[in-house]
Amino acid sequence: MARQFGERPPVSMRVYNFAAGPATLPLPVLERARDELTDWQSSGMSVMEVSHRGRAFARVATDAEADLRELLAVPASHKVLFLQGGATLQFSAIPLNLAPPGCTVDYVCTGAWSKKAIADAAAFATVHVAADAKASGYFDVPEQALWQRSPQAAYLHYTANETIGGVEFPFVPDSDGVPLIADMSSTLLSRPLDVGRYGLIYAGAQKNIGPAGLTVVIVRESLLGRARQGTPAVLDYRAQAAEGSMLNTPPTFAWYLAGLVFKWLKAEGGLEAAALRNRAKAEALYGYIDGSGFYSNPVARACRSWMNVPFRLPRAELEQPFASEAARAGLANLEGHRSVGGMRASLYNAMPLAGVLALIAFMRDFAARHG
Amino acid sequence: MARQFGERPPVSMRVYNFAAGPATLPLPVLERARDELTDWQSSGMSVMEVSHRGRAFARVATDAEADLRELLAVPASHKVLFLQGGATLQFSAIPLNLAPPGCTVDYVCTGAWSKKAIADAAAFATVHVAADAKASGYFDVPEQALWQRSPQAAYLHYTANETIGGVEFPFVPDSDGVPLIADMSSTLLSRPLDVGRYGLIYAGAQKNIGPAGLTVVIVRESLLGRARQGTPAVLDYRAQAAEGSMLNTPPTFAWYLAGLVFKWLKAEGGLEAAALRNRAKAEALYGYIDGSGFYSNPVARACRSWMNVPFRLPRAELEQPFASEAARAGLANLEGHRSVGGMRASLYNAMPLAGVLALIAFMRDFAARHG
């Protein structure tokens, strides 16, 4: 280790971190966690060191759920679960819980994460792709009138925001009574949401919720109890709901930190206010890109993500200098996903407008020097 | 919230925390994590906020694996995985990966955690209980000469340390060439171990490794690639090994903290030194209990756990006063598991001998007042 245990670092500074996830977290949340890391609530222990079944942690768990319910106005018809394994484990858990063996499930494919969800579901059910954005290069969301739904699907699944492609659904699909399921990993909590329209919503925490290692599932209670034979107990939604998400030891520190994020978000005005900020941030960046004559974003305007803004430079050889100069200017993690290259700025809730304006100023300067 | 975000708590003190898990962590590790929580390695970001695929975190991941391999002398024949879902998810993952459909698996039952492992495995394979400690009241480990193994078992599973009962295997079973599998959640890293004798070892982190939400699996590479059809991708050991445990986003903060624990353990002299300390702690406490004429421990001497020491008071009505007076004396979380009652002192690596001596002094005083 570079430093001795317990030795304080000389300076503490922060950068604007545009990572797609694990992503930037609100500084007040981190400072709070730091200040009580060795002595939480005057217990003489870290929150990491106490039993998940003790009174003190039970309060953390119930507060976090109550705050999340309040933020999203989750109806009483829906259970909120705090699980492990990320969205990827949900790709399997969803068909295991909601698709009887041999049935068909409908998926809409709008990019890389849809494809992964489809591939994993195919191990458990017949996957029918009701619509595929391939013809648009995955830069658009097929309008619902053109979808070809299967008549007896157990559910309809879509990826509300494609983190890599930067494509976000501009509408909530009408599922005609079939349970509607959405991967909202990188869009949950970015704006208000009508949770009652969904059978199930899931999200890995490492974008707008907290650190990696926590997964939020919001599921209509009437859908529970259908898990097929051979579903691992930890993945059975009904069993987890019955145990308050503590069928097994939960990721307590991540849960605690998510609870702090929810309180921060409430203190910042909730999701209406978050939506105003997020819209302003996204409009500023897309507006600059479109008018720059230098940078470009290929996504159809109606489907541009508020959270993940991929963009290209006019020449690929400028990508590396752009990323390193930006990092030196305190604008970190602007490289695009390794599968697609280019640049990407993720603008989650914890990214302030000031960070986006600093990014735009840097981009303008960079373009002037290389245009 | 009681305090404003970012406001420092007035005093920082620590107690001796005897919780069974999530459990006490080394203070130097917590202090290090605290000091770099908002600015890790002068990056201007928390370790929680960086990509698991970036260079900086890759170093954390490889260092943690290298240090764990060094501590346990893991042979090159074995892969080390850093997963999610706890030991409980492994109860399902193990048969999914290692037991072909329709086969028989052998389990030894020595208490509550064995029973859970058996119940979950029964969804995937025919479980044969080769030995059951029921006759002893689960206070002993049946000697291996009496086990009734099935001829074609896919593997032999045992629970190396029963965290609730305080029963620890005093020997490594001879599995006669069948893969030997052990739940080592509450004993891994307490002493040296001959990893080469095992097909697979697994452990939830929240005892000797780090915070809850991380699971370590050490598996012989030649056993990989047998996962049955319908194994969720995240649970497929071969797939996770191929991706360096990053098939999905890993619990980065827990992994980082585990890495700090491994470095702390190395600095403290490794597992030989840990074994000396743990033996001394356990012998001091059991010795005092046995000689007290007041407290009692029911476990056969050869099978007493070094890590979890359950004990009884002469009258059940003394349990509540004992626990609350101990807590006021800075000795926290001595209540036994809710399923069995009584008291329990967990003595993981991060519990110093001084804590055990303070507990004994308190117990002596309490006995004098209530004897």
Image (cartoon, coloured by chain):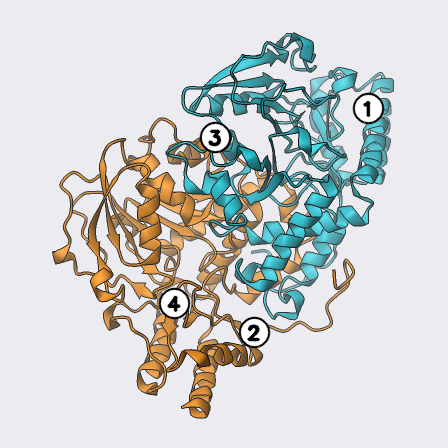
Chain colours: A orange, B cyan
Q: Which mark is residue A1?
A: none
Q: Measured from the top left, where is residue B15 in percent x and y? A: 76, 44
Image quarter where the C terminus of chain B lies is: top right
List the residue tagged with mark 1: B286
Q: CA distance from mark 1 to mark 4?
A: 58 Å
Sequence order check: which comes first, mark 2 or mark 4? 2
Q: Which mark is residue A15?
A: 2
Locate residue B362 relative to residue A257 in the image: left or right.
right
Residue B232: tell me if it is visible.
yes
Nearer to us of marks 1 and 4 is 4
Nearer to us of marks 2 and 1 is 2
Within the image, what quadrant is residue A121 found in?
top left
Residue positioned 42% across, 36% down in the render: A235
Q: Chain of mark 4?
A: A
Q: Chain of mark 3?
A: B
Q: Measured from the top left, where is residue A332 in percent x and y? A: 53, 73
List the residue tagged with mark 3: B92
Q: CA distance from mark 2 to mark 4?
A: 18 Å
Residue positioned 86% across, 23% down in the render: B287
For the residue pair A54 and B297, the one nearer the viewer reads as: B297
Q: Chain of mark 1?
A: B
